[in-house]
Amino acid sequence: MTRDETIYALSSGGLPSGVAVVRLSGPKARFVLETLCGTVPEPRHASLRRLRDPSDGQVLDEALVLFFPSPASFTGEDVAELHLHGGRAVVAAILKTLEGFDGLTPAQAGDFTRRAFEAGRLDLTEIEGLGDLIHADTEAQRRQALRQMGGDLGRLYEQWRELLVRSRAMIEAELDFADEEDVPGSVAETIWVDVIRIRDEMRAHLADNRRGERLRSGLHVILLGPPNAGKSSLMNALARRDVAIVTEEAGTTRDIIEVHLDLGGYPLTLIDTAGLREDGVGVVEREGIRRALERAGEADLILWLGAAGEAREVLPEGLGDCPVWQVASKSDLGSGAVGVDEIACSVHSPGGLDELLARLGGFASETIGITEAPVLTRARHRDGLMRCLEGLDRSLEGDDRPLELRAEDLRVASDGLARIVGKTDVEDLLDVIFRDFCIGK
Ligand SMILES: Nc1nc2c(ncn2[C@@H]2O[C@H](COP(=O)(O)OP(=O)(O)O)[C@@H](O)[C@H]2O)c(=O)[nH]1
Ligand SMILES: [Mg+2]
């Protein structure tokens, strides 16, 4: 699909900056360059040009200018880039000049990428990878996003989808020729071997413990324990700054407090909570405890704290099935032995803290470390795969069902995959996916 409007936007970040990049895409990009710089630079070569205001010939800036003719550009359309001096007035003058052209309109968030999708330059998983790359905070997130943007995941789904489409075509061919004589042995029979293989591969792909999704969102590690166990102190010590208030008074922490850590490239959110206790608490603290338990139900790991040597409280039941580590806090007080399954630590001695951090790093790399096979990274992928799997399972149920129905099941299955990569009507998905993009991307 080609569009009449040419879009433009500041594609680099906040101003002022060393360089600011204004990007244009659409049928007028070439004309705009001719008008501003006199001539259009050689395709894909950076050229230094004076940009002039067409109304009075005044020089607006001296800039590096690039032109990417359709179709070999990011959006598939004619694209121009103006690498300006990154001053506010420079950029404002250029944007004002562009506003004066007919057929030019400021880009909305994600517009450039949306055009790239419509031109078939990227599939939906690649676009999501690109969005993740821009938002990646840690090294592992960057690597995962880059792989998805490179098409790893999309290719896997596309292979499966093509095989299913072909299988269905073979069944339909067989149905068409069923009345004729001398049809060689059933072709359709052989396709079920492929269907079973895809189903098994898909099941294995889904049984990934949500590692890709968890790497995207970061691991959630929650500190739980009775009041005064040292949760807030531990949080501050691990974060190396004072995020939570620490006092000797029981019930100091009421709200949920979070810090984001980068642990050897893995994103981790540490969550401090109100101490869990039953008696003598007011409305606010009770609400804090309710929130703590609610968050614990969604956590990836619970650190259950109790002061070393003191009787261990029992973790409340029904908090989901995430792992729980027993942490013996305030071990410097030396009041008693630490159990074998406990991690001893004190905010006054680095040894225990370092060990805890090392263990957390190990846990992160085990749970969300990058694997060789591509991983799904969104609930959206999981939904499409589940839909596909249902179709596959149904198509394999009982060989006595009519072939027409089994072929229809395969259609439902391949549609589930088509939705993930965007090879079917996905208009309803696009706004959600592009919502996270910035203007100029
Ligand atoms: N000696 C010692 N005191 C600690 C340690 N961690 C916390 N405390 C003290 O224990 C009290 C309660 O700590 P706090 O972090 O507020 O506990 P929370 O209620 O679980 O958040 C405070 O007086 C802290 O100074 C530790 O490792 N060693
Ligand atoms: Mg606290």
Image (cartoon, helix red, strand yellow):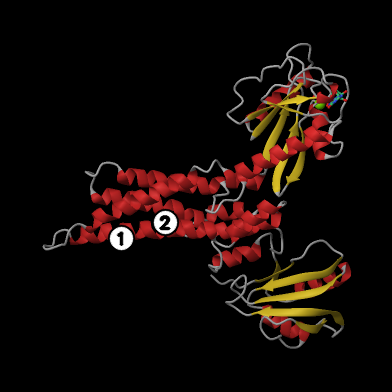
Q: Position of residue 249 (x, y in %)?
A: 87, 19
Asked if the residue at label 1 sits under 8 Å from ligand 2, the reply is no
Vertical order, 229 against 47 (above or below): above
Would residue 175 be found to the left or right of residue 337 on screen? left
Count residues near mark 1 (Cα–Cα under 10 Å), then give few for <14, some for 14-19, many for 20+: some
Q: Position of residue 412 (x, y in %)?
A: 38, 50
Count residues near mark 2 (Cα–Cα under 10 Å), then give few for <14, some for 14-19, many for 20+: many
In the picture of the structure, the residue carrying the numbered disc 1 is: 169
Residue 127 appears in view: no
- Residue at disc 2, secondary structure: helix
Q: Residue at x 81, y 74 (%)?
A: 84
Mark sitting earlier along the chain (1/2): 2
Looking at the rendering, the quadrant in which ligand 2 lies is top right
**Residue at the far bottom in the pictured view:** 39
61 and 146: which one is in front?
146
In the picture of the structure, the residue carrying the numbered disc 2 is: 160
Tell me where residue 278 sits by quadrant: top right
Q: Residue at x 87, y 65 (%)?
A: 16
Q: Residue at x 63, y 29 (%)?
A: 297
